[in-house]
Amino acid sequence: MKSYGITSKVTIDDEIERHAENIFIKGYSIKNNLLTHEDCLKYTSILNNVYEKQEVDFGKDKLERIHELDIARMPFLQDRRMSELYLNPFIIELTTHILGSNFQLHLQNAIINKPNKYHHQSSWHRDLPYQDWVISKPLALNAFYCLTDFTEENGTTVLLPFSHKIDHFPSEGYVNENEVKIIAKAGSVIFFDSMLYHRASYNSSNMIRYGVNNLFVVPILKQQVDIANFFHKDEGLSEQEKMILGLKFVVPCSVLDFREKRYNRIVNEK
C-alpha cells in the first residue's frame, strides 16, 4: 500500500486482530462461514421449539403488550445445545481480545423476524440502552449469528458505523445517509461494539429471518437475568464456562462471604 508523510502505521496479519481493528474503529466486523448449513438448520429448529414454549408459558397477548413477540430469551437455559454458540472457540478468542480475560454472558436472545411484519427490534437502539456517553475501551461485545441469509428483502440488521464513538443519537438526515445494511450469508456472525446504534429492518420477503444475539460484558455490568443462579459450580462445567455464565462474579451475600472468597482466591493462587 503506497503512502507518504506517515510516521505511525499498524500492520496486521492475524484474523482476530483484523476483526478487532474493525470493531475498535468503525464498530463492527463480519466473520463468514462460522456455522455450517446443517448447524443453522439445527439451531433454527431449536429456536422454534423454545419460542413456542415461551409463548405458551407467558401468553401471546402478554408478550405483545410488552413488545416481546418473536423474541426467544435465553434459549440456552431451555436447550443446552444453544450454549455451543457462545462457547465457540473463535467467539471466545475474539471476545477475550476485545474485553480482556474476564467477561460474562449478559444475554442470549434470538430474533425471529417474520414476513411482512415490523419487529420491535426495528427501532434504533444500543444493546446497552439509555446510555448517552462513550468510553475509550469497549465494555460489551455482540456476537450476532445469522442463521438464515440476511438480505435487504428479509429485514437484515442495519448498523450505524462509528456511532459507538458519539454520546448522542445523530440527526435523521445523518442516519439515512450513513446507515449500513448488513448483507450476510447464513452461518456468518456480525460482531459489533454494544454501544453501536443498530436495528432490524422490515421483512418484505416470504421467509422468516432468524438471528441469535450473544452479548458479552465486562463483570462490572450485571446480567440481564441472573444466569449464574441457574447453575452450580459442581455441575461439571469447565472453568471457562463458569466464567462466561457469571459463576465467578456472583456478588458476595455478606462481608464474611466477601472475605472468604478473597481469602480462597489468594490461597489458590499460591
Image (spheres, rainbow, N blue to C red):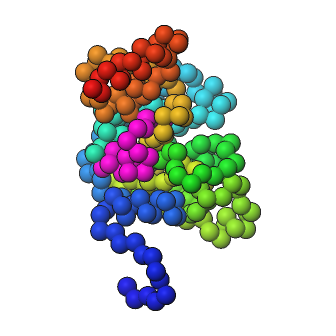
The quarter of the rendered structure image containing the C terminus is top left
Asked if residue 8 is positioned above or below residue 18 in the image, the reply reads below
Residue displayed at 29% across by 68% down: 13
At 37% from the left and 64% from the top, the residue drawn is: 18
Residue 253, percent across and down? 52, 13
- Give the residue at x 30% y 53%: 34
State yes or no: residue 105 in magenta.
yes
Q: Position of residue 96 (x, y in %)?
A: 37, 46
Question: Quadrant of the image for the N terminus?
Answer: bottom left
Give yes or no for residue 229 being in the magenta stretch: no
Name the side, left or right, on which 209 lies relative to 224.
left
Closest to the observer, 148 or 83:
83
The mark total stands at 0
Q: Position of residue 90 (x, y in %)?
A: 30, 50
Q: Which image quadrant for residue 65?
A: top right
Q: Is residue 30 visible?
A: no
Q: Which residues are magenta?
A: 90-106
Quick check: 68 left or right of 76? right
Q: Residue at x 40, y 72 (%)?
A: 10
* Residue 8 higher or lower than 197, as above or below: below
Q: Residue furthest front?
A: 270
Q: Nearer the viewer, residue 260 or 234?
A: 260
Q: Nearer the viewer, residue 219 or 258?
A: 258
Image side of residue 7 versus residue 32, left or right: right
Instruction: Tell me, yes or no, if residue 23 can be seen here.
Output: yes
